[in-house]
Image (tube, helix red, strand yellow):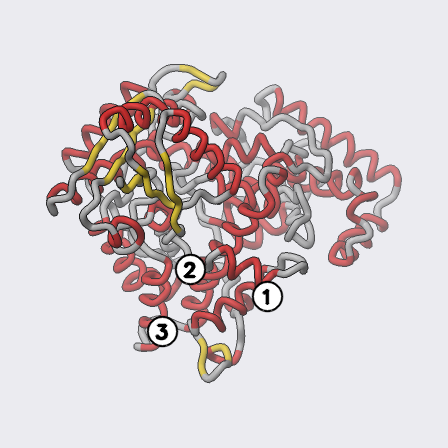
Amino acid sequence: MTVWLRGDHLVRRSGPVARRPDEPVLLVEARSFARKLPYHPHKLILLFSAMRHFRDSLRDDGRTVHYQQTETFEDSLAAHFEANPGDTLVTHRPQTESAQARLESLVAKVGGTVEFVADERFLCPPSQFDEWRGDGRYRHEDFYRFMRRETGYLMTDGDPAGGEWNYDDQNRETPPDEWTPPDPPWFEPDDVTEDVIEWVNSTFEGSYDERPYGGDWADPEPFHWPVTRRQAVRALDHFVTDRLTEFGPYQDAMLEDEWAMSHSLLSTSLNLGLLGPDEVIERAITAYEDGDAPLNSVEGFVRQVLGWREFLRHVYRREMPDLAEANQLGASEALPDFYWDGNTDMACLSDVVGGVRERGYSHHIERLMILANFGLIYGVEPAQLNRWFHAGYVDAFHWVTTPNVVEMGLYGAGVFATKPYASSANYVDKMSDYCSGCPYYKTKTTGDGACPFNALYWDFLDRNEDTLRSNHRMGLMYSHVDNKGDEELTEIRERAEEIREMATNGEL
């Protein structure tokens, strides 16, 4: 029997690696995976460097590790079973039944067998989620409270700590002009990572899938993400000690010169298995209990990990494959090229896309209220934006991006989003400093120099009225639409069409 660890399951403290200490381990670098999309180079460096470091750590402890570098997973598995006839692979269960069936078929095709075990990167097993949901609608807030009660996190005698389940009203502040967050942690590449950097840059350079791999991501800044368990723990320490206190109040704020703000930057380590959700939650709660971090910041972080991350994983598990192609609003516009090349005069989009191009990252409110919001009101086909997110972010995996982008960002399916998260320039101006330096006017809806968010917002409401007006959460928005005369709405429609033409022609 061999423990097969796929690249995003580098879990050593629990699961099959811990429970089968005498069994060999199989890890596979498949170049075909890296060619599926024009992935950001930092995404590939992160994944392959973490895998090689994990291999070396196991070998240093005397563990037998079969590390294969092949073109496809099928090539690797065929070679493994040829060398180990009759072997059985033990691996973590994929996120969907269809993905599990594909792996079973792949292994059977090359003459092997495979057993699946629970995914140790999550706290809520499928059976628990399915029992919680029953036949009801997905409601994140209900699930989050359920998980708080089940785990006891931030609970006192059956009640939420501080008397409230969430502290959103304290977590929507904009920092004062003189505020500066701590520098984000930076991990210098060692020899292993340097070898991966060289390999990625030489192996995946060039063009495929109609998108240049290297040039279109520009010249990224030096790679700096944690790739080992030790580095991930240091990143966690840095967040809890230096960033957690101000994470809460400013978690929705955006500043042009502060890409990390006070966010945790732990998503890469969580999604690879270098950190567990329980340990990051418990470290944050300990800081609150010791008086080192305020409740609003700690609760906001716990909600992201215990609530949102677990919730999305199960929505994806249950709603695929339909979720990936969902498009309930019938959006059909092509993704504008500036998502790839960053060439736009819009200050907010230019800065956020530039950050993705430089480091494969932006924080959650930039993802939702800049990138996804623009795609929503512009009318981008959800699958196209999802594909871009999956290619561009270092922490992106399909189970993460699909419910976040297709459903939460673009209101594509209506399985849990209760309304589209659409906004005009007013929200961007309220929560950021972008508008002050932008050549577009935040207060203008039509005419030369009018901010594209404004006309696109009203055009979005107008063209989707048949679907959205009956939504009780959209009543206020449509009351404002009703205050606009036919002439103004015609001008808005014309300006929206002009914006799409400008975007198509690379002139926005």
Badge nearest the viewer, 2 or 3 = 2
Q: Between marks 1 and 2, how big is the CA–CA gap? A: 16 Å
Q: Nearer the viewer, mark 3 or mark 1?
A: 1
Q: Residue at x 36, y 70 (%)?
A: 285
Q: Is residue 128 left or right of residue 41?
A: right
Residue 412: percent from left, percent from top: 66, 41
Q: Amino acid at mark 2?
A: Leu
Between residue 376 and residue 272, name the one nearer to us: 272
Sequence-wise, the earlier of marks 2 and 3 is 2
Task: Determine which residue is flagged by label 3.
Answer: 288
Residue 358 shows in this picture: yes
Task: Label 1: state its secondary structure.
Answer: helix
Q: Residue at x 51, y 58 (%)?
A: 127
Judging by the rendered image, the residue that carries numbered circle 1 is: 142
In this view, the residue farthest toward the front is 86
The Cα–Cα distance between marks 2 and 3, rounded to whole angstroms, is 21 Å
Q: Position of residue 382 (x, y in %)?
A: 62, 35
Q: Relative to 356, is 309 above or below?
A: below
- Amino acid marked by disc 1: Asp
Q: Are marks 2 and 3 in contact (CB under 8 Å)?
A: no
| Image quarter hosting the C terminus | top right
Return the residue at label 2.
Answer: 123
